[in-house]
Amino acid sequence: MWIGGGSGSGKSTVARRLAEQGGMRLYSTDEAMSRHADRMCPAQAPLLAAFRTMDMDQRWCQRSPEQMLETFHWFAGEGFGLIVEDLLALPREPVIVEGFRLLPRLVAPLSAAGRSVWLLATPEFRRKAFATRGSLWQIANRTSNPELALSNLLERDRLFTNQLTTEVETRGLRAVEVDVELTTEELMTRVRQALE
């Protein structure tokens, strides 16, 4: 099962609970990011190589949210092959794969019908989720202009969610909108229904 979506949409919480309830293995693409980044050379991941040369202000203050979206290596699918490689190396048992790196255009050819869903959070939900877990300012506070950096990051993530929405709709895939009114139990129910 594949659970994708933007940052702060509840993917990790939902995937962890589904894995526990169903006795399944959980594979988090976030947890593999640094390992995957270390394995890729600049020729394999040019966007990652460029990102690594930037300081925090260049990454989050000196570029528009649109530029951030277009050039962010994980949003472009760099390293997706390493996710597949990891999954093929796992024992043959049910697994839930979760993370924002699961782009619909890359997952769709690998997923059986009804075995994938994308969580599409509203900006309000995403901001509340980051604030609740204490990570809202984590990146922004490492720049010279935290307010601008945070604004840019939130807008970039909104644009990414819009991009995911378009990809999901174009391919006829399943999605769940996640807003501040939705409880965790309601979200779990909707995800289960989407995966049936």
Image (tube, rainbow, N blue to C red):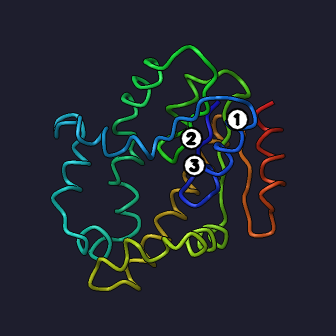
Image mark count: 3
Real-space Cα separation, disc 1 to disc 3, in angstroms: 12 Å
Give the camera-side residue of 91 and 191.
91
Say whether disc 3 or disc 2 marks the residue closer to the N-terminus.
2
Q: Mark 2 points at which residue?
A: 98
Say left or right for 135 vs 140. right
Residue type at tag 3 = Leu
Q: Residue at x 67, y 68 (%)?
A: 125
Q: Position of residue 99 (x, y in %)?
A: 53, 45
Mark 1 and mark 3 lie on one chain; the one further toward the N terminus is 3
Identify which amino acid the numbered label 1 is placed on: Gly
Tell me the quarter of the image containing the C terminus.
top right
Q: Which amino acid does label 2 sit on?
A: Glu
- Disc 3 + disc 2, Cβ < 8 Å: no
Rounded to the nearest whole Å, what is the CA distance between mark 1 and mark 2?
A: 19 Å
Residue 172's mark?
1
Q: Give the residue at x 74% y 28%.
A: 114
Residue at image location 40% in from the left, 68% down from the top: 65
Q: In this view, does 150 lie above or below 83?
A: below
Numbered disc 2: secondary structure: strand
Question: Mark 3 — residue?
Answer: 164
Residue displayed at 16% across by 40% down: 42
The quarter of the displayed image where residue 133 is located: bottom right
Residue 4 left/right relative to 71: right
